[in-house]
């Protein structure tokens, strides 16, 4: 059986087409039904996915924004674009992360990428989810959250003169340019997340290190600590979790949590989950 497996965030979608023995992997732009209409998703799929794969008997698509009300929209876009006769299963990126990291064991599962999310997983299904609320109201610990706080702290001179100067020299951002990017151009969350690597380049500076830890502490306090469990590991997935493992692990230990796996992408785990029953 040819299976097409996808892990989609707001920034990119990672795909694998496999028959259980051979596999081919590729990347397209992100698909998010809260940021794109069905027609926009179809256009992106037609432009980037169809040239890569024209046949699949089963599609397992896990994506950001794939809530119960949006799952039929994503499934329809996939069916109308590429997979008229395929069995299509669409799930949230949270379910994908849980299956990839925990398999069939219980745990707290967290996503730290462009956005953030978390859940309590019992080995079969998501049993509790603290709403991430998006990059405007929440998404603590995410790339967009770090970028939002970073640019605010620099432009409002909450950091030292050294850090503010470095930020200005490396990004060229002004108050006028950031307002235009965030309030007038599409995908402001992606843009804000693109600023977070500044922290990775300067994490050796004490105030940047403390800033990063504070961003992750906010994630634990406002999300992970709300789950009624301290006896299961806390797993992480996503580019931000992968890039800032030291800071993340330090904050987890400080708050008494046991870190499980930290992975950059769930795709390998999902391949194993769906091809090794």
Image: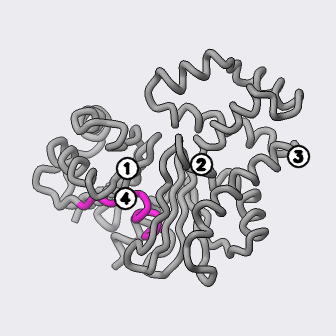
Q: Quadrant of residue 41?
A: top left
- Mark positioned earlier in the residue sequence (1 or 2): 1
For the residues bearing labels 3 and 4, Cβ distance under 8 angstroms: no
Residue visible at 74% across and 40% down in the picture: 199
Residue 99 painted magenta: yes
Could you classify mark 2 by the number of other residues whose Cα lies within 10 Å: few (under 14), some (14-19), or many (20 or more)? many
Judging by the rendered image, the residue that carries numbered circle 4 is 92
The reply to whether residue 251 is visible in this rendering is yes
Could you classify mark 1 by the number of other residues whose Cα lies within 10 Å: few (under 14), some (14-19), or many (20 or more)? many
Query: Which structural element holds mark 3?
Result: helix
Q: Position of residue 44 (x, y in %)?
A: 30, 34
Q: Distance between the residues labelled 3 and 4?
A: 37 Å
Residue visible at 49% across and 46% down in the picture: 134
Residue visible at 59% across and 34% down in the picture: 192
- Mark positioned earlier in the residue sequence (1 or 4): 1
Query: Which structural element holds mark 1?
Result: loop
Judging by the rendered image, the residue that carries numbered circle 2 is 142
Q: Which of 69 and 253 is in front in this view?
A: 69
Judging by the rendered image, the residue that carries numbered circle 3 is 206
- Mark positioned earlier in the residue sequence (3 or 4): 4
For the residues bearing labels 1 and 3, Cβ distance under 8 angstroms: no
- Mark positioned earlier in the residue sequence (3 or 2): 2
Judging by the rendered image, the residue that carries numbered circle 1 is 65
Q: Distance between the residues labelled 1 and 4?
A: 7 Å
Q: In this view, does 158 lie above or below 139?
A: above
Q: How far apart are marks 2 and 4 (CA)?
A: 17 Å
Q: Where, quadrant-wise, is the C terminus in this rendering?
A: bottom left
Q: How far apart are marks 1 and 3 (CA)?
A: 36 Å
Give the residues in magenta: 89-100
- Mark positioned earlier in the residue sequence (1 or 3): 1
Could you classify mark 3 by the number of other residues whose Cα lies within 10 Å: few (under 14), some (14-19), or many (20 or more)? few
């Amino acid at each position: 059986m040819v299976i097409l497996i996808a892990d989609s965030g707001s920034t990119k979608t990672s795909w694998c087409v496999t028959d259980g023995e051979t596999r081919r992997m590729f990347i397209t732009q992100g698909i998010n039904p809260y940021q794109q209409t069905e027609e926009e998703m179809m256009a992106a799929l037609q432009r980037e996915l169809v040239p890569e794969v024209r046949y699949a008997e089963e599609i397992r698509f896990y994506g950001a924004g794939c809530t119960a009300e949006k799952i039929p929209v994503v499934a329809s876009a996939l069916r109308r674009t590429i997979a008229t006769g395929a069995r299509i299963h669409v799930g949230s990126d949270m379910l994908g992360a849980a299956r990839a990291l925990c398999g069939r064991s219980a745990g707290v599962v967290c996503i730290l990428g462009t956005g953030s999310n978390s859940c309590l997983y019992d080995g079969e299904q998501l049993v509790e989810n603290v709403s991430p609320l998006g990059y405007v109201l929440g998404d603590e610990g995410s790339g967009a959250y770090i970028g939002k706080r970073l640019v605010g702290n620099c432009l409002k001179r909450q950091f030292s003169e050294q850090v503010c100067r470095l930020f200005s020299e490396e990004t060229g951002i002004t108050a006028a340019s950031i307002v235009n990017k965030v309030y007038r151009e599409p995908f402001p969350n992606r843009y804000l997340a693109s600023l977070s690597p500044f922290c990775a380049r300067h994490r050796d500076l004490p105030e940047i290190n403390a800033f990063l830890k504070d961003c992750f502490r906010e994630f634990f306090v406002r999300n992970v600590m709300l789950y009624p469990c301290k006896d299961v590991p806390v797993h992480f997935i996503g580019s931000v979790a992968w890039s800032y493992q030291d800071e993340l692990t330090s904050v987890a230990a400080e708050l008494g949590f046991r870190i499980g796996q930290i992975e950059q992408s769930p795709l390998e785990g999902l391949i194993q989950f769906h091809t090794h029953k």
